[in-house]
Amino acid sequence: MRWEGHRLSGLGQGGKRSQPESSPAGQRWERVPRPHSCAGKRRPVQGCRHQGLHETGECPTYWLIQDSGDWLLLSGGGNAGFATVYAAKKLGIPATIIVPTSTPLATVQKMEEQGTEVQVFGKVWDDAYAKALALAETKGWVSIHPFDHPLIWQGHASMVRELKDSLGHKPGAIVLAVGGGGLLAGVVAGLQDVGWRDVPIIAVETKGADSFNAAIKAGRLVTLPEITSVAKCLGAKTVSARALECASECQVISQLVEDVEAVQAVELFLDDERMLVQPACGAPLALLYTGRVQQLQREGHLNPGLDSIVVIVCGGSSIQLAGLWALKTQLGMK
């Protein structure tokens, strides 16, 4: 079995390297060339989103500015926040980013260093978003949603088009993290664009930030009482309506992992690839490191003979080694 862009030979349960024979017969992880996209190629973690904002018209930044405004406003300190900072600087216009108190200080400082005003408000992203909406209404600023906008989805969809050009064949599955659902909606749009609707998507969340999984089970949008996971970038209390719709348009397999599994995956990925990512990215990686893919095959959710998997790893702007050690201590990990 191939995971596009990363060697996982002999990984077994619990993130520990097991003997190769632990994998299903005829399958092994091997390194393959990385496609030219954020799904695999090494580049700054926010590079793909930055390029989508500045180089193409497929983003709400340009569209909304042309429509009505000259001051950008966004809630969130993740990739969308850095992308807005980048676009505002390139366009020469001011921007304000509203982030919750869970945002690392280093992230706030990085955005401020680019000349962007950062306001810290509320415990979780939903609080920051409410504040952003209020500011947009009172000041007339251009409010950009970090994940619930068709043009954001189009930007994400470009990864699938690049994958088709690079791989030359359908992957057996695509594994990604779900927070608010923008990445999921974009990948579904991309699969539809290139005629790959039959490619399964494994949508992974951490327990305690699992609004998509809760919505799938209930058949409707569900608002979580609070976000308890350490993967704060996945912390939208309510997933977007479009994300839930996607589950009826493509084969979307919702999976949950523990915080400990996500952080273990972050550490293993750092060891294997020399690349430090956030727990939100550790969630999809954990699916491979813990042998859950093979479990899904045994349960009939995935083709037993699938030969490759694409894992979208996007997010390292808000993590440092000290933060990783702090997470391990918080979770009681050795």
Image (cartoon, rainbow, N blue to C red):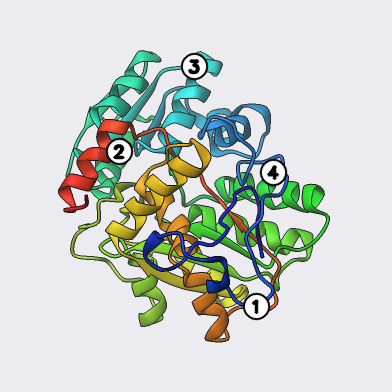
Look at the picture and state if 330 lies above or below 13: above
Comparing 184 with 98, the one in front is 184
What kind of residue is marked 1?
Ala
Mark in the foreground, 1 or 3:
1
Please tell me which residue is depicted at 50% across the width and 44% down the height of the picture: 272
Q: Earlier in the sequence, mark 1 or mark 2?
A: 1
**Which kind of residue does numbered mark 3 sit on?**
Lys
Which residue is labeled 1 in the image?
A: 25
* Tag 2–tag 3 contact (CB < 8 Å): no
Q: Quadrant of residue 228?
A: bottom left
User: How many marks are shown on the rendered structure?
Assistant: 4
Residue 13 is marked as none
The residue labelled by disc 3 is 89
Q: CA distance from mark 1 to mark 3?
A: 53 Å
Which is nearer the eye, 181 or 62? 181
Question: Is residue 266 visible to us here?
Answer: yes
Query: Which label number is shown at residue 132?
Result: 2
**Residue type indicated by callout 2:** Ala
- Secondary structure beneath label 4: loop
